Amino acid sequence: MLSQTEENYLKAIYSIGLSNTKSVNTTLIANKLETKPSSVTDMMKKLAEKELINYEKYKGVTLTQSGKKIAIEIVRKHRLWEVFLVNKLHYNWDEVHEIAEQLEHIKSTTLVGKLEAFLEFPKHDPHGDPIPDENGNIAQHKNVMLSSVEINSSCIVIGVKDSSSSFLKFLDNANIKLGDTLKVTAKEDFDNSLLIENNTLTISISNQISQNLFVKKI
């Protein structure tokens, strides 16, 4: 049986691999988990011995099929628990990540299956991230960001790239939530900030914000 720390490493490698076109190296993993590179190296050796990763010093790290399966299972549990916390216990979407980090390590597949059924088989978590099914199938976001939407075009908010508490609180204060229809009315050449319409509100958002919102063009 894997420890919580080992599971966290597998999930971190999986997550980095989705967003990084280059190889997953120990520095990236150390930054993700806020730990020392030397600690990462030690863990890589342990996970390689368990045949959960492919690891060679000074080269990139990749998950084996077994390692990837475990990582996706953890992601699945994490996102289902986030749905439960928001929809059933009425937590705000900026409050649930740390709690789900603890709940994702529960081993019972029966409990997870019952949780999914209780939630009526949700497809996305409260941040718009897709939830893997029981077979590990997962549909990733198409990389369409609000920053790429043309002037006078509209789109629907489908997810966030940055799920930090500070960013989610910003969206709450700006009255932007999943499912909202946004219209880009202007773009500033100087800093690529956008003027957008959301329902009856017109607000200005920075390029940093627009590059962290996944949208579907309409």
Image: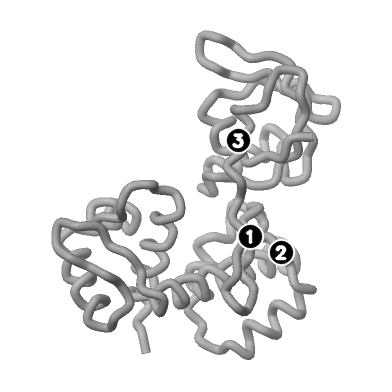
Give x and y (percent) for residue 68.
43, 72
Q: CA distance from mark 3 to mark 1?
A: 16 Å
Splitting the image into 4 quarters, where does residue 124 fall?
bottom right
Give x and y (percent) for residue 52.
33, 77
Q: CA distance from mark 3 to mark 2?
A: 20 Å
Q: Secondary structure at mark 2?
A: loop
Q: Is residue 166 above or below residue 201?
A: below
The foreground one among 202 and 71 is 71
User: Which quadrant of the figure contains the N terminus?
Assistant: bottom left
The foreground one among 98 and 136 is 136
- Asked if residue 98 lies left or right of residue 59, the reply is right
What type is the residue that disc 2 sits on?
Lys
Q: Is residue 153 above or below residue 55?
A: above
User: Which quadrant of the figure contains the C terminus?
Assistant: top right
Name which of mark 3 and mark 1 comes first in the sequence.
1
Q: Which disc is residue 123 wearing?
A: 2
Q: Is residue 163 above or below residue 193?
A: below
Give x and y (percent) for residue 74.
50, 73
The foreground one among 36 and 154 is 154
Residue at figure coordinates x 52%, y 68% from the top left: 75
Please report contact status of discs 3 and 2: CB closer than 8 Å, yes or no. Answer: no
- Asked if residue 37 lies left or right of residue 178, the reply is left
User: Within 10 angstroms of label 3, few (less than 14), some, or many (20 or more) residues?
Assistant: many
Splitting the image into 4 quarters, where does residue 116 fall?
bottom right
Identify the residue position indicated by label 3 in the image. Answer: 145
Name which of mark 3 and mark 2 comes first in the sequence.
2
Q: Secondary structure at mark 3?
A: loop
User: Within 10 angstroms of label 1, few (less than 14), some, or many (20 or more) residues?
Assistant: many
Name which of mark 1 and mark 2 comes first in the sequence.
2
Please report contact status of discs 1 and 2: CB closer than 8 Å, yes or no. Answer: yes
Identify the residue position indicated by label 1 in the image. Answer: 130
